[in-house]
Image (tube, helix red, strand yellow):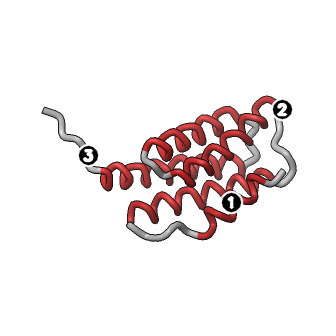
Amino acid sequence: MSEELSDSELVEAFAKEARQRCDVISAGLDTGTTDFEALRQEAHALHGTASALGLRRLGELAGLMESDLSEAAEAGELRANRAAQISEAAEALAAGVRASADGDEEPPDVGRSLAQLFAI
């Protein structure tokens, strides 16, 4: 007999996963990696899990990160200033999932990162 996890347990597990994946994205960007496809895959996983858990704005943020990283994978480079913005977005996403797991309000950095990544 398998034991199903509650919604709060799923979000708590995702908070841990999100922190790890966001750290990979930030570290890759901070070290100047050109393996944007690997970073895109991390963002894709975040996008899918956030969306599946009903964390709509966090899923949207991860989707924007994924889109930028996909574009970079095709072009071989990120657009100007995007590395810092994506790294900040990754931190905001991890903090947002942690806040959700803790029952806290969404950090303002989530909205700020959404606005930055929507801007061209």
Q: Are marks 2 and 1 in contact (CB under 8 Å)?
A: no
| Among numbered discs 1 and 3, the one appearing first in the sequence | 3
* Eye-nearest disc, 2 or 3: 3
Q: Residue furthest right?
A: 80
Q: Quadrant of residue 90?
A: bottom right
Amino acid marked by disc 3: Leu
Q: Classify mark 3: helix, strand or loop.
A: loop
Q: Is residue 100 shown left or right of residue 6?
A: right
- Please tell me which residue is depicted at 48% across the width and 70% down the height of the picture: 105
Amino acid marked by disc 1: Ser
Q: Is residue 28 above or below residue 119?
A: above
- Please tell me which residue is depicted at 79% across the width and 29% down the height of the picture: 74
| Among numbered discs 2 and 3, the one appearing first in the sequence | 3
Q: Position of residue 15 (x, y in %)?
A: 43, 54
Q: CA distance from mark 2 to mark 1?
A: 23 Å
Instruction: Identify residue for label 1.
Output: 113
How many residues crowd around disc 1 within 10 Å: few (fewer than 14), some, or many (20 or more)? many
Amino acid marked by disc 2: Ala
Instruction: Identify residue for label 2.
Output: 75
Instruction: Identify residue for label 3.
Output: 5
